[in-house]
Amino acid sequence: MNIILLGPPGAGKGTQAGRLVSERAMVQLSTGDMLRAAVKSGSPVGLRAKAVMEAGELVSDSIVSALIGERLDAGGTDAGVIFDGFPRTAPQAEALDLLLAERGRSLDYVVELEVDEAALTERVVGRFTCARCGEGYHDVFKRPVKAGVCDVCGSTEFKRRPDDNADTVATRMAEYRAKTAPILPIYEARGLVYRVNGMADIEEVAGAIGIILDKGGALDAF
Ligand code: AP5
């Protein structure tokens, strides 16, 4: 099964992708994570991407499409792929169709997380992750059970993303509205789009996505 999680910054794409990875053994392909890894490694791609990401703008279509192609070829994706943060433009959507077709695969669902943009800045600015295992947390919505200690690995080191500040979030939202939201009609025309209320709590959102993946075309029965 190959699905796209679509939604603006802070909609919960990464949170829900993480759930699907642990519950369904699917593979999360997050171009944001791939680009952050490239920045951290100091690779040529990372050097080109760093300033663009910190400004909240989009990295070039050719770079992100190549990253996805390389990851698909690395294998281990038979149980399914969750595209998280890709595609983000019409050329990326075209590239994804080609990348999948060349590998004998196709898209099953596009899940749009519908959210209230006004609430997203709080979500994004309050986000932090475990510096050791990457588990995601939030100052208000998802705190570690024991303050200052990661629930998963016990680390006491946490980090925040440099682009998670109010100014950059505003640019990221504008990029989403201008370049990413317009790709939805492409998938609507193919009958692939399912909408989920991304303002519900994390468990409810996960439940709604689970129903889509399990019931698919029979969703109207709910
Ligand atoms: P990327 O890393 O993809 O960031 P993004 O799309 O802005 O998405 P986020 O990771 O900010 O949000 P999310 O929807 O995953 O939310 P999360 O689950 O963390 O991209 C970063 C940058 O890389 C881009 O700006 C661009 O420069 C570049 N880039 C990446 N892909 C690219 C591409 N394809 N083309 C070009 N450039 C690209 O949740 C947020 C917080 O809210 C968390 O703290 C979470 O705990 C909390 N939360 C989640 N769900 C809920 C809920 N239901 N209720 C309450 N809190 C919740």
Image (cartoon, grey):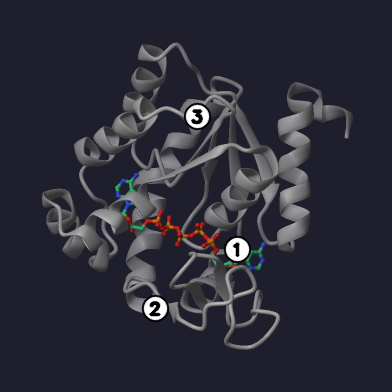
* Nearest the eye: 85 or 189: 85
* Residue 5 rendering spot, x and y as whole percentages: 54, 43
19 vs 50, left or right, is right
First in residue order: circle 1 vs circle 3: 3
Label 3: element kind: loop
Q: Residue furthest right?
A: 221
182 vs 36, left or right, is right
Task: Report which residue position mark 3 lands on.
Answer: 77
First in residue order: circle 2 vs circle 1: 1
Q: Amino acid at mark 1?
A: Asp
Above or below for 20 versus 144: above
| Among the 4 quarters of the image, the one containing residue 116 | bottom right
Q: CA distance from mark 2 to mark 1?
A: 16 Å
Above or below for 44 versus 187: below
Front disc: 2 or 1: 2
Label 1: element kind: loop
Above or below for 35 versus 53: above
* Residue 196 rendering spot, x and y as whole percentages: 69, 46
Q: Amino acid at mark 3?
A: Thr
First in residue order: circle 3 vs circle 2: 3
